[in-house]
Image (spheres, rainbow, N blue to C red):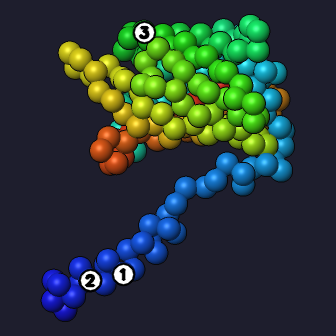
Amino acid sequence: MTVQNFLFRLFLIGPLFLTGCSSINIEAYKDKDPELVLEEFFDGDLTAHGVVKDWSGKVIRHFNADIKAYWREGVGVLEEDFVFDDGEKQRRVWTLTPDGSGNYIAEANDVVGPANALVSGNALFMQYVLRAPYKDGTIDLTIDDRMYLVSPSVIVNESKMKKFGISVGQVLLTIVKK
């Protein structure tokens, strides 16, 4: 097979493979219990416990976080204070503003622009650009963040990190309501 023939075939069938790899739609979780109601779960004191993996799947860090969550005039605030295994501390403050359709606009101090937080059944999906510390500066990473309420007091969260469309790592964590 010539290179030209190979490229032509790839052009014709490549989109079929990409379609097959498309991500799961949030609506796939609409009938899943327990139902995630952000105003109920994210209200009060919570903790988070997780690991950071590199592109190969190797755990490179772990962390714990205290989260203070509350709602004021219909807007949710999550004050997250992280402590990593090497002693590094990070603070992220999210605001969750209802958009009128049952979803939320999510913003944080180290997130570039607003994110759409989509909620359905027991799931919450967000995609956003995180400006993360890197060496002496920062790096912008595209985050595909997915949360699943597995009991009234526990969320399991997976966040896939990409740079230029290439997987560079993953964060796995649980969020526990006290």
Which residue in the protein does label 1 denote? 12
Which amino acid is tagged 2? Phe
- Coordinates of residue 136 in the picture (x, y in percent): 20, 15
How packed is label 1: few (under 14 Cα within 10 Å), some, or many (20 or more)? Answer: few
Any part of residue 83 in sight: no
How packed is label 3: few (under 14 Cα within 10 Å), some, or many (20 or more)? Answer: few
Mark carried by residue 8? 2
Does 81 sit left or right of 14 as displayed? Answer: right
Q: Residue at x 48, y 10 (%)?
A: 91
Which residue in the protein does label 3 denote? 89
Sequence-first disc among 3 and 1 = 1
- Coordinates of residue 44 in the picture (x, y in percent): 75, 10
Marks 1,2: beta carbons within 8 A: yes
Q: Residue at x 67, y 21 (%)?
A: 97
Residue pushed farthest front? Answer: 100
Q: Nearer the viewer, mark 3 or mark 1?
A: 1
Sequence-first disc among 2 and 3 = 2
